[in-house]
Image: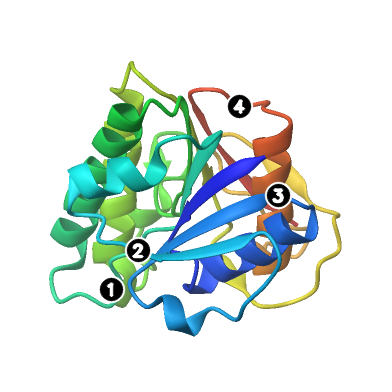
Amino acid sequence: MNIALIGATGFIGSALLKEALSRGHRVRALVTQPHKLAPSANLDPVKSDVNDTDALAAQLKGHDAVMSAFSGHAQADTEAYYLRGMRSIIAATRQAGVSRLLVVGGAGSLEVAPGVQLLDTPQFPAAHKASAEGARQALRLLRGEDGLDWTMLSPSALIAPGERTGRYRLGSDQLIRNAAGESRISAEDYAVAFVDELEKPAHPRQRFTVGY
C-alpha cells in the first residue's frame, strides 16, 4: 500500500514506520526534520507542518491511507496544540480525498470500571494529563466525523520499547490488564496491531485497544 505517516520520527511513529516498511509498504514520512530518517527502500521523507492544512492535503493526496502518530508532548500547551493539529489532519485528509485515517490514541480514555475512564482516576500521572485529555478530545472529534473511514488504536497504560512477539489481546473501550493486573504493550507489538488494522480493517469508525 501507499501510506502517508505523520509523525514518523516519534516514539510510536518510528515503530509504525519500521513495521510498515518491513511489510513492503511504500511510506511517505511527514515530519518536521526529515534528516533524522535514515535512507531506506520505499521511504519518502518529507518536511511537513500539520497546521498548514492546504499544504498537508497536497502531501497526502494520492495515498491509500493516512496514519497519524502526531503528538504534542513537546509543546508548552500540549492539549491545545494537539487538538489544533488533529483538526488540521482530519480536514487535510478529507481535502486530499483519502478515505482512511488511522490514528494513534491514548490510554486515558479507556474504562477501568463501568463509566470510569483511566484519565479520571486519582492515580493517573499529572505529567501526562494534558496529552491524555488531548487524545480523549481527538476521539470525540473522530466520533463526530462523518466523512472519513477512521480508526483509533489506544495502547495499554504502559507502552515502551520491547519485543515484537505478535502475541497480544485486542479490546474495545476497556483497559486490558494481564493476570498480574498490569496494563502494558511494547511499541513493537502496538505497531503490529496497528499495521494489521491497516491491511485488514476490522474496526471501521471505531476505537480499539491492544495489550498483553
Of the numbered discs 3 and 4, the one sitting upstream in the chain is: 3
Camera-nearest label, 1 or 2:
2
Coordinates of residue 64 in the picture (x, y in percent)? 56, 33
Of the numbered discs 4 and 2, the one sitting upstream in the chain is: 2
Indicate left or right for 140 with 211 as reference.
Answer: left
Coordinates of residue 39 in the picture (x, y in percent)? 62, 77
Indicate left or right for 195 with 47 as reference.
Answer: right
State how far apart marks 4 and 1 are (Cα). Answer: 31 Å
State how far apart marks 2 and 3 are (Cα). Answer: 23 Å
Q: Residue at x 59, y 54 (%)?
A: 27
Quadrant of the image occupied by residue 132: bottom left
| Residue 120 visible in the snapshot | no
Residue 126 is labelled as 1
Quadrant of the image occupied by residue 140: top left
**C-beta proximity under 8 Å, tags 2 and 3:** no
| Residue 140 visible in the snapshot | yes
The residue at which mark 4 appears reads as 203
From what the image shows, is residue 119 above or below residue 10? above
Camera-nearest label, 2 or 3:
3
Quadrant of the image occupied by residue 159: bottom right
From what the image shows, is residue 74 above or below residue 119? below
The amino acid marked with disc number 3 is: His
State how far apart marks 1 and 3 are (Cα). Answer: 38 Å
State how far apart marks 4 and 2 are (Cα). Answer: 22 Å
Disc 1, SS: helix
From what the image shows, is residue 21 above or below residue 158? above
Coordinates of residue 190 in the picture (x, y in percent)? 66, 57
The residue at which mark 3 appears reads as 25
**C-beta proximity under 8 Å, tags 1 and 2:** no
Choose between 187 and 21: the one closer to the eye: 21
Camera-nearest label, 4 or 1:
4
Of the numbered discs 1 and 3, the one sitting upstream in the chain is: 3
